[in-house]
């Protein structure tokens, strides 16, 4: 069944955030991808085709957008998706050892889900917490910082009991329903999407 078949109000709301043009419809790719992933955990081929049709583009383009961001998944993920920062600063501080410890304890590799459905793992690009490396993120929740093997073991023990420990730091910036950025302290920053307007053509009158 089509995911968006009974969600026309949601689809209309997403498209209303962008200019009413072919380019504007393509701009809605990422929120549509996020909507499916939040509901189903990943975006399979059928959903890629559906999103492409809604946006007037191809499934190849949708997949290429997804491949640029490590936050999007085309394969199933576990209840707890563990993401280890693998850039140079974290690597120098021990993220490679953390990664080896993690996959050995869980006996799971990227693209796999543990037999109990709880865990999946992924190496990601910089998460912006270089001063507290090595670190990891669980799902889209906060940051677990300075993760030693013993701290990693404690986190996994809690997750096996479905008791996710509080992160050391929440994700520093989120976006609310109005498109405004919100800092970890609740402060709203940036402009609202209601204030956006379409730019005038570079060449008035269509001149080349």
Image (spheres, rainbow, N blue to C red):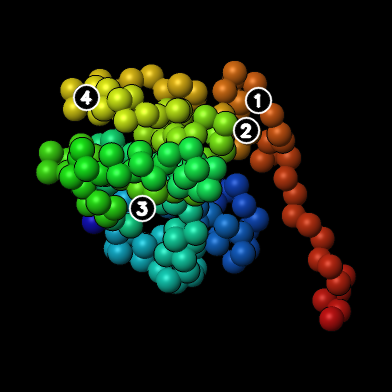
Position of 135 relative to 205 (above/below):
above
Q: Which quarter of the figure is the N terminus placed in?
A: bottom left
- Mark closer to the chain start, 4 or 3: 3
10 Å crowding of disc 4: few (<14), some (14-19), many (20+): some
Residue farthest along the left direction in this orientation? 115
In the displayed structure, does residue 17 sit left or right of residue 53?
right
CB of mark 2 within 8 Å of CB of mark 1? yes
| Residue of label 2 | 181
In the displayed structure, does residue 188 sit left or right of residue 39?
right
The label on residue 73 is: 3
Cα–Cα gap, marks 1 and 3? 29 Å
In the displayed structure, does residue 194 sit left or right of residue 46?
right
- Mark closer to the chain start, 1 or 3: 3
- Mark closer to the chain start, 2 or 3: 3
10 Å crowding of disc 1: few (<14), some (14-19), many (20+): some
Cα–Cα gap, marks 4 and 1? 36 Å
Q: Which quarter of the figure is the C terminus placed in?
A: bottom right
The label on residue 188 is: 1
Position of 147 relative to 48 (above/below):
above
Cα–Cα gap, marks 2 and 4? 34 Å
The label on residue 157 is: 4
Closest to the observer: 42 or 52?
A: 42
Tag 3's secondary structure?
Answer: loop
């Amino acid at each position: 069944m089509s995911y968006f078949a009974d969600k026309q109000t949601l689809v209309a709301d997403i498209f209303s955030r962008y200019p009413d043009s072919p380019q504007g419809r393509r701009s809605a790719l990422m929120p549509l991808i996020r909507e499916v992933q939040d509901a189903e955990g990943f975006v399979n081929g059928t959903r890629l085709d559906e999103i492409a049709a809604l946006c007037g583009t191809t499934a190849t383009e949708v997949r290429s957008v997804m491949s640029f961001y490590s936050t999007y998944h085309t394969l199933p993920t576990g209840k707890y998706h563990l993401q280890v920062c693998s850039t140079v600063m974290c690597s120098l501080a021990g993220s490679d050892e953390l990664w080896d410890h993690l996959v050995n304890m869980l006996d799971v590799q990227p693209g796999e889900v543990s037999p109990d459905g709880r865990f999946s793992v992924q190496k990601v690009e910089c998460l912006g917490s270089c001063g507290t490396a090595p670190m990891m993120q669980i799902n889209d929740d906060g940051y677990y910082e300075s993760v030693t093997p013993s701290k990693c073991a404690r986190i996994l023990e809690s997750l096996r009991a479905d008791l996710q420990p509080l992160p050391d730091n929440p994700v520093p910036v989120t976006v609310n329903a109005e498109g405004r950025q919100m800092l970890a302290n609740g402060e709203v920053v940036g402009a609202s999407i209601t204030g956006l307007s379409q730019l005038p053509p570079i060449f008035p009158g269509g001149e080349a």
